[in-house]
Image (spheres, rainbow, N blue to C red):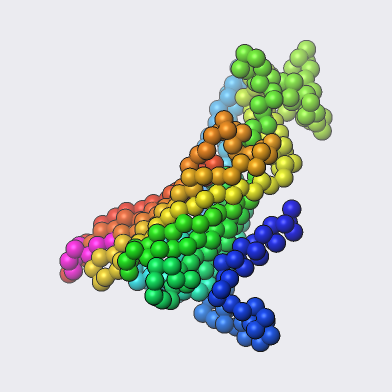
Amino acid sequence: MKSNVILFIFMCFSFLLKGQVDYKEYLKDFDLQKTLKKHLKFSTVYGAINGGTSVSDVKTYSVSSGELQEGIISTPYDYSLTLGIRKIARFGYENKAQTFYDGTESNYTDAATVGKVRGFEYLFEVDYARQQGIDYIDQHHFIRYSSDDDCDGPFCIDHFAAKLEYLKDGFADVEYFELSERYRYKKSKDLAFSIGAAHRLAEPYGYNPLDEWILDNGNLHYTYLAIQEGYSIDVANSEYKDPAGNIVANSADVWREVVIPKVLSDYTERKRNELDKQIQHSIIIGFDYYYYSKNKWIHAWGNLLPYHYDNGNEFSYHKYNNGEQWYDYSGGVIYGVKVDKHLGYFVEGKYNRYWNREWYDFKLGVNYVIF
């Protein structure tokens, strides 16, 4: 699978650059050290550790044999360890307010279809984080290529864009590779439309391992599932044991409300991890718009994937969508206005929806300077 994916990516980029590069001539004079120096110039390598207090401790109360018992639920402190390298040109509305990258930056423009400058831009970032007691390893890597030399004619070979991206978002529970290559039609200096193909490699979203445990009446046969997973039940002595033989519950209520959710979660995660990644080929259409002046700016982009090739795979998302097509889409907007020397306002955000999973963030506000 990995070798096929690597070959596929190489073929896509070869197609993208066809007609622009004479490979034999290029490779004859290729200088690896010079090329690396060129692409690493002005990039920033960064690493940072951030931490802080999580939610406060919560006192719990229970009664056992008539006696009041108190307990405390403590949540360990939040932290994040970030390692990365980035080379992304700033748009006119962006200012580097900080001297150093501290790993907490969230730039909406990283999700844009094309960059500020032509050529290659990239981001490789890994975050080891804990929030409210839950550990995550988030990753975001991409290489973005924007080709726009203002050559004559709407079908100029330079009006192309490509992006290779890997995203793993623990909060959204989404992980995928995506390669897209597209032709861009420049309607005007600010507005461009694009069409092309997107190829995504991800787990078989839509697959639910618990479906096979659903009874005819619609209920979940969770007790039998737990037994198959190695748990044991001694109803007479009110003992419920895990596969290692440890007692995890001493009442049916604790078994049902505390242990069973963990059993279902572990089982679902294990079954999902056992399956191979699935590749999805889709048509992608989009737009990007960028206007900037000293007192007003707007940067917007959007992508729609309206058609997806059905390869008949057992775990194809088509199967879980009743054999029908579906719409995946993403977009973002950054809008700011300086009304006068005192007042200004802004709206920024991005939204993604893939395989009926969504993740988004936004912010808006008003600034008023008094002097």
Segment colored magenta: 336-343
Q: Position of residue 29 (x, y in %)?
A: 66, 87
Q: Position of residue 305 (x, y in %)?
A: 49, 48
Q: Position of residue 192 (x, y in %)?
A: 38, 62
Q: Give above or below for 12 relative to 203.
A: below
Left or right, 325 with reference to 192: right
**Residue 338 is one of the magenta-drawn residues:** yes
Left or right, 285 with reference to 246: left
Q: Nearer the viewer, residue 200 or 8?
A: 8
**Residue 260's quadrant in the figure?**
top right
Residue 35 in view of the camera: yes
Q: Nearer the viewer, residue 300 or 325?
A: 325
Q: Position of residue 270 (x, y in %)?
A: 72, 39
**Residue 60 is one of the magenta-drawn residues:** no
Q: Residue at x 63, y 51 (%)?
A: 201
Q: Residue at x 62, y 24 (%)?
A: 257
Q: Residue at x 36, y 58 (%)?
A: 300
Residue 167 in view of the camera: no
Q: Give above or below for 365 relative to 103.
A: above
